[in-house]
Image (cartoon, helix red, strand yellow):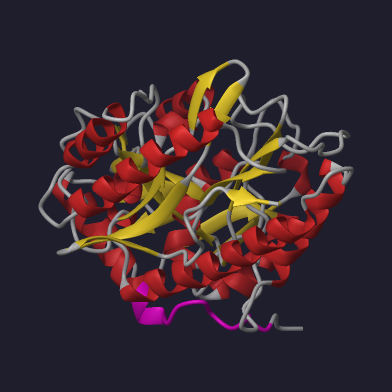
């Protein structure tokens, strides 16, 4: 029985546009075949979001073929056929005998494909930073006539400037994020278990709004007193108490695209220390968004934030943001002093202003935004107040 493809997230010409940009970079580097293995990059180029990257898989992009070829574990091949825009004939499901096999694995299937298609003596691009050294060596050993080049982050930089179609999905993700934050405001109360609150918030994120549910659960962090000096803890078995502070960071997800948001909740009236840092961080946030204009550098945004924050007597050690899109973080531009990456329209960032002042105290606020000629345009509509419950 022929597998019926799911409704595609983007039209075919959008995926071909993205592949054309990758092929242009391949031509510039004189690469004949690029093998893309980073899951977020595979999502970007095909629409595939299944969680199968725990075993060897990859997208082989041949300059001479319009569509790429995907290799994955045989049990995951049907998901690729459902989700990817490419013809099912370009999807290779390799046998189970290659799983947990110390001698051969799925990358041998890719190498066999290259040899069978007379590509074994060409220049081949690999995302080497995400591959085990033994895998890179396998390509070099089995393809002695090939020239292996590092193609790390080439697709990620192309992903940096979003199409209007991608921006629309990030707005939808942001609406779901806001729904989660609204639910957090409703359910976080004294004597409520952190786990129960998390369940309610995640349910709201998943249900989404406007008949556009989240299609995945992205990173979710709930750091409550006495753990507000931490940044990446999830919920615990504890209950909230009067006087508790709760730092939240999470995102809705639309077909892999995220729009993260951070807010601080005070169970009861916030402390003077919390109110002071909040005032400084909001001032820095507004200055950073104003600076995030087309033609500015990431450095300029960070300087604007840090300058405003220092006027309120605080410092932030970590960077104040990073490129964001599929699967949260893009490993490219950072909003930090010294990063001279020039901002272009529709680049998207998480202006992440979490500030962990000491081991026992931290504060969070953030916005996801796109770059415009007038500054950063935020996706969330949630107020920038300390949420007092």
In the rendered view, does 270 fall on the left or right side of 296?
right
In the rendered view, does 202 fall on the left or right side of 39?
right
**In the rendered structure, which segment of residues is drawn in magenta?**
4-14
Q: Position of residue 125 (x, y in %)?
A: 33, 41
When the figure is inspected, residue 213 is found, relative to residue 374, above or below; the finding is below
For residue 201, what is the image quadrant? bottom right
Residue depicted at 50% across the width and 49% down the height = 328
- Looking at the picture, tell me which residue is in the foreground, 139 or 328: 328
Residue depicted at 60% across the width and 51% down the height = 387
Residue depicted at 10% across the width and 53% down the height = 295
Magenta residue check for 6:
yes
Magenta residue check for 290:
no
Residue depicted at 80% across the width and 59% down the height = 200
Q: Position of residue 29 (x, y in %)?
A: 18, 44
Q: Position of residue 277 (x, y in %)?
A: 45, 33
Looking at the image, the residue that sits furthest to the top is 359
Would you say the magenta stretch is mainly helix, strand or loop? loop
Q: Position of residue 236 (x, y in %)?
A: 82, 34
């Amino acid at each position: 029985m022929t597998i019926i493809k799911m409704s595609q997230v983007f039209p075919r010409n959008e995926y071909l546009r993205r592949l054309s940009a990758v092929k242009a970079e391949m031509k510039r580097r004189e690469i004949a075949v690029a093998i893309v293995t980073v899951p977020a990059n595979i999502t970007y180029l095909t629409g595939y979001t299944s969680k199968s990257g725990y075993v060897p898989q990859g997208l082989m992009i041949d300059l001479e073929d319009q569509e790429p070829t995907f290799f994955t574990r045989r049990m995951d091949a049907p998901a690729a056929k459902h989700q990817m825009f490419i013809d099912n004939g370009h999807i290779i499901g390799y046998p189970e005998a290659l799983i947990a096999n110390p001698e051969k694995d799925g990358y041998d299937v890719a190498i066999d494909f290259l040899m069978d298609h007379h590509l074994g003596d060409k220049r081949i691009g690999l995302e080497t930073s995400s591959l085990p050294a033994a895998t890179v060596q396998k390509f070099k050993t089995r393809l002695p006539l090939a020239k292996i080049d590092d193609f790390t982050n080439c697709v990620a930089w192309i992903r940096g400037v979003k199409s209007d179609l991608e921006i629309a999905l990030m707005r939808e993700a942001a609406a779901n994020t806001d729904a989660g934050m609204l639910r957090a405001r409703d359910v976080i109360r004294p004597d409520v278990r952190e786990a129960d609150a998390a369940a309610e918030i995640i349910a709201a994120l998943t249900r989404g709004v406007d008949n556009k549910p989240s299609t995945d659960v992205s990173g979710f962090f709930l750091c409550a007193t006495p753990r507000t000096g931490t940044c990446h803890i999830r919920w615990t078995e504890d209950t909230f108490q009067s006087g508790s502070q709760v730092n939240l960071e999470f995102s809705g997800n639309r077909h892999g695209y995220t729009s993260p948001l951070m807010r601080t909740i005070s169970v009861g009236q916030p402390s003077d220390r919390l109110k002071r840092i909040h005032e400084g961080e909001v001032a820095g946030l507004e200055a950073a968004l104003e600076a995030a204009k087309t033609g500015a550098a990431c450095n300029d945004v960070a300087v604007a934030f840090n300058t405003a924050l220092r006027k309120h007597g605080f410092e932030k050690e970590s960077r104040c943001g990073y490129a964001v899109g599929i699967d949260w973080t893009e490993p490219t531009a950072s909003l930090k002093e010294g990063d001279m990456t020039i901002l272009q329209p529709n680049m998207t960032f998480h202006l992440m202003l979490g500030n962990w002042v000491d081991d026992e105290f931290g504060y969070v606020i953030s916005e996801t935004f796109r770059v415009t000629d007038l500054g950063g345009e935020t996706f969330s509509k949630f107020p920038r107040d300390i949420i007092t419950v």
